[in-house]
Image (cartoon, rainbow, N blue to C red):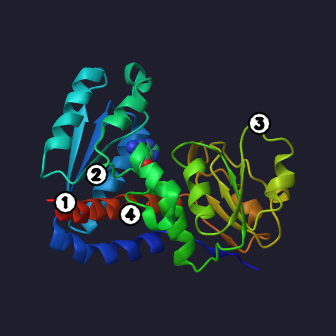
Amino acid sequence: MTPLLLDGKVAAAALLDFLKPLVETLDPKLVVIQVGDDPASSSYIKQKVKSCEKVSMRSEHIHMPSDTTIETLMQKIDELNNDEDVTGFFVQLPLPGQLSGHEPEIIKAISPMKDVDGFGAYNLGKMFLSKEFEHLPPATPSGIIRLLEHFDIEIEGKHAVVVGRSNTVGKPVAVMLLNRNATVTICHSRTKNLSEITKQADILIAAVGKPKMITADMVKEGAVVVDVGIHRTDDGLCGDVDYEGLQSKVSAISPVPGGVGPMTVSSLLRNCVTAKERQMELR
Ligand code: GUN
């Protein structure tokens, strides 16, 4: 049987439709900081700006040269934190060499009220406490949850296995699933007998960063699989999952591209709307 396609374009379009009238009323503004010319980053930013246009959200792309110093970047962050017209902003990662070691202090410098990526300690902490306490939850994990909910995939009581433990995806999505009453196992590069664990998953979240690493022999019959990876190969884009190989085995699967990617972008815009709502309450 053909598995259910967890189509991120469809689920993201539904979220954007929901956001459009809110954007019209609240008039938020999203700012993107790009340092350098990483081609993948340029392409992601284009998608983010395009989605803003779809809901008529104001956006600005600040493009800084690749030799930007930490002092200059911090000054820009300070300026955006204090600009009342800017609702939310983020610094696109990865950063060029001289800045990459400064990521923690860069993330820390962004006001928690404007941290639409949800990468900072305040927003991660709120997300950690309970699903009701979420303020600006991290965009990709939040997009994964929304993708599952859009297609009525039950989370409660299910065994969710997350492969990957990054601060931006693996760890937070595990907590978000736990807060929705899944039983959660986190696996990573040092996990022994990985496939013994992934084979137990009702819901498998692949966020490993290795092309087609999750193969059919590693999944249970009827599992729901969400692929967070995106890799440019000679044969085009692929994810962390062997999509073709899993087709005859799983009950639902997200494609790459067109799965988690559009959900991250729409969740970022969702956070920008939430940020504006909260800022107006505070003023
Ligand atoms: N690079 C790849 N994905 C992301 C993201 O969601 N946010 C930021 N800031 N950088 C990224």
Give the residue type at disc 2: Met
Quarter holding the C terminus is bottom left
Mark 3 vs 1: CB contact within 8 A: no
Residue 156 place in picture, x, y as percent: 66, 74
Q: Earlier in the sequence, mark 3 or mark 4?
A: 3
Q: Which residue appears at 83% of the width and 60% of the height?
A: 199
Marks 1 and 4: which is nearer the front?
1
Give the residue type at disc 4: Ser
Asked whether, in this view, residue 199 is left or right of residue 144, the answer is right
Query: In this view of the protein, can residue 258 be seen by the observer?
Result: no
Q: Earlier in the sequence, mark 1 or mark 4?
A: 4
Marks 2 and 1: which is nearer the front?
1
| Residue 282 badge | 1
The residue at which mark 2 appears reads as: 113
Q: Which residue appears at 17% of the width and 51% of the height?
A: 86
Marks 3 and 4: which is nearer the front?
3
Q: Quadrant of residue 34?
A: top left
